[in-house]
Image: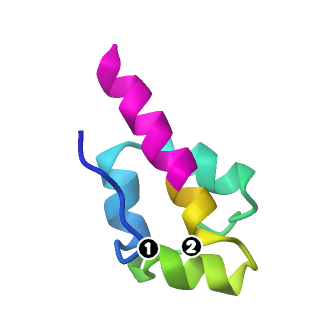
Amino acid sequence: MAQVTKDMIIADILAIDPGNAAILMAAGMHCIGCPASQGEPLEEACQVHGMDVNEVLVQINDYLDKKAEK
């Protein structure tokens, strides 16, 4: 399974697995459906929302790893 990095844009992260949307929304990023956010890198989106990009990356990549194990 692909690993998400902080320089990836939101649209690519959602394309890897739509379940990533729930993780981003739970972290406080409720604008992921906005067309403008789709082209924004994860690191920039986290900065705008006052989120720690590394914490978000751990959550997303843990989710993807667990899903790949099944």
Q: Is residue 7 magenta?
A: no
Residue in front for this viewpoint, 63 or 20: 63
**Contact (Cβ within 8 Å) of mark 2 with mark 1:** yes
Q: Is residue 2 above or below residue 54?
A: above
Residue in front for this viewpoint, 66 or 16: 66
Q: How is the image coloured?
A: rainbow
| Secondary structure of the residue carrying numbered label 1 | helix
Residue in front for this viewpoint, 55 or 46: 55
| Secondary structure of the residue carrying numbered label 2 | loop
Would residue 63 appear left or right of 31 to someone viewing this image?
left
* Location of residue 53 in the rendering, given as x and y in whole percent from the top left corner: 58, 70
Q: Which mark is residue 16?
A: none
> Is disc 2 surrounded by few (<14), some (14 to 19) or many (20+) residues within 10 Å?
few
Measuring 50% from the left and 58% from the top, which residue is drawn there?
57
Looking at the rendered structure, the kind of residue marked 2 is Cys
Choose mark 2 or mark 1, whichever is in front. 1
Location of residue 68 (image quadrant): top left
Label 1: which residue?
38
Residue in front for this viewpoint, 4 or 9: 4
Q: Is residue 61 visible?
A: yes
Would residue 4 appear left or right of 51 to someone viewing this image?
left
What residue range appears in magenta? Answer: 58-70
Measuring 32% from the left and 19% from the top, which residue is drawn there?
69
Measuring 73% from the left and 78% from the top, which residue is drawn there?
49
Label 2: which residue?
34
Quarter in which the C terminus is drawn? top left
* Location of residue 13 in the rendering, given as x and y in whole percent from the top left corner: 38, 58
Measuring 56% from the left and 73% from the top, which residue is drawn there?
34
CA separation in Å, label 2 and label 1: 7 Å
Q: Is residue 70 above or below residue 11?
A: above
